[in-house]
Amino acid sequence: MSPPDFTHLREGRPGCPSDFTLDRFHAGELAREEAWRTEHHVAGCADCGARMSERRAGFDAVDGVDPRAMLARIRTGLDRPAPLPQRLLAQARRWFAPLAAVATAAIAFVVVSQQVETPGTRMKGAPALHVFRLAGDHAEEMVSGGTFAPGDRLRFAVDLPAEGQVAVLGVESSGTLYTAWPQEPGHRTQLPAGTAIELPGAVSLDAQPGRETLYLVHCPADGAPPRCESAGSGNAPTCPSGCVTTPFVMDKGSREPRP
């Protein structure tokens, strides 16, 4: 079975970007030059301007949808074991909730693409770090710059454009460098290319307050596991040549810890 061709999904007039391209533009996933071309086109095209308005409206653009109820159903039970099809559907909802303006069609296609995608599929774009905060029986995906508290338990997932060595490092406001993943020595750090690759285990935040940054470190597959050194507070750690770092900022300690 061949995966659906998202690049031609519901095209507008000749020369208009596809729905998939507009979705990626709205999510900030396009390369700089393609994003500039898409933005320039949308600004001068009434049809595409209306299509972008739907995406910016999010849940409000879908009649009869209660966003709070939908998000509750999406988030509930993310960490509960389930048969493979249900897990794929939950993963699709988790990653693509921001694109809810086309949720009915998008989730169906995403489930198909997840089923046919293999762990070794080469993905385009830069490495990305997804941070999830565990709360009761569900998990919520956090955004960079969000507020965290001592005791918050976090899990990670990564998008990798190519196979490579992976680590998640943290730099405290004092400049101290620590390893958030892997936490166990000897854990396999070479991962295949792909999206939404879940890293096993969870980490609990300590009581050290301040602005703290997590860094996804992605190094060439033929190298050793990442070994980096702190470059001070507010700076990416110094890592071996060929490694790429992706930051995720946490504002930690400005609210009461979760029970």
Image (spheres, rainbow, N blue to C red):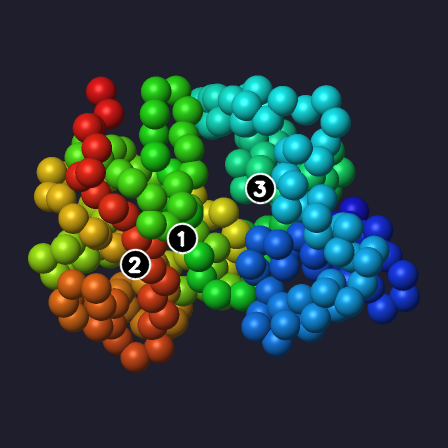
Quarter of image, res 91 = top right
- Considering the numbered disc 2 on the image, is that residue within a helix, a strand or a loop? strand
- Considering the numbered disc 3 on the image, is that residue within a helix, a strand or a loop? helix
How busy is the neighbourhood of tag 2: few (under 14 within 10 Å), some, or many (20 plus)?
Answer: many
Residue at the spot x=64%, y=46% of the render? 56
Q: CA distance from mark 3 to mark 1?
A: 16 Å
Q: Does label 3 or label 1 sit earlier along the sequence?
A: 3
Q: Position of residue 42 (x, y in %)?
A: 73, 63
Q: CA distance from mark 1 to mark 2?
A: 8 Å
- Considering the numbered disc 1 on the image, is that residue within a helix, a strand or a loop? strand
Residue that protrudes farthest toward the bottom in the picture: 241
The amino acid type found where label 1 is placed reads: Leu
Residue at the spot x=24%, y=72% of the render? 239
Residue hosting label 2: 215
Q: Nearer the viewer, mark 3 or mark 2?
A: 3
Q: Does label 1 or label 2 sit earlier along the sequence?
A: 1
- Nearest the viewer among 26 and 203 is 26
Residue hosting label 1: 129
Determine if residue 108 is in view: no
Image: 4 above or below 31: above
Q: Position of residue 224 (x, y in %)?
A: 28, 68
How busy is the neighbourhood of tag 1: few (under 14 within 10 Å), some, or many (20 plus)?
Answer: many
